[in-house]
Amino acid sequence: MNATAIKTPSQFVQDVLKALEDARGWKYPVRPIVCDNKQTAMELAAGMDFYYGGHEMIQSSDAAGKETWIVGSRGYYHYVGA
């Protein structure tokens, strides 16, 4: 799923991204979040693409060996080259 696949991110994604946004605004880097569900990570990544122009995702494992996804964005300024 990516920004081209969605018209508007879900309310859940909007709320999470608002909580993660930099205090200076939406054009700055977004704090990474650890997801234990791939679908949620993909939805957040698509929302970051939609609002900020891109995302970074790392697939990893937690201390117990459970698969996790870390999703963040370098922010709008980064992706537009400002």
Image: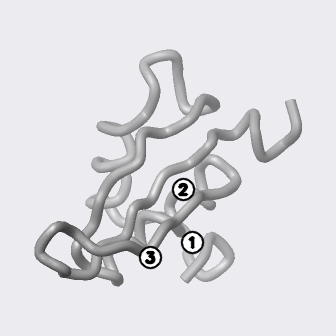
Residue at which label 2 appears: 48
In percent of width and height, residue 40 lies at 31, 74
In percent of width and height, residue 64 lies at 11, 75
Q: Could you tell which of marks 1 and 3 lies nearer the N-terminus?
A: 1
Residue at which label 1 appears: 7
In percent of width and height, residue 60 lies at 37, 73
Q: Could you tell which of marks 1 and 2 lies nearer the N-terminus?
A: 1
Q: Amino acid at mark 1?
A: Lys
Q: Could you tell which of marks 2 and 3 lies nearer the N-terminus?
A: 3
Q: Residue at x 55, y 76 (%)?
A: 6
In the image, residue 12 sits, relative to residue 82, either above or below, namely: below
Q: Amino acid at mark 2?
A: Met
Discs 2, 3 touching: Cβ within 8 Å: no
Q: Residue at x 35, y 59 (%)?
A: 13
Q: Residues within 10 Å of mark 3 (few under 14, many from 20)?
A: some
Residue at which label 3 appears: 42
Q: Residue at x 49, y 51 (%)?
A: 72
Q: In the structure shown, which secondary structural element does the residue marked by tag 1 occupy? A: loop
Q: Nearer the viewer, mark 1 or mark 3?
A: 3
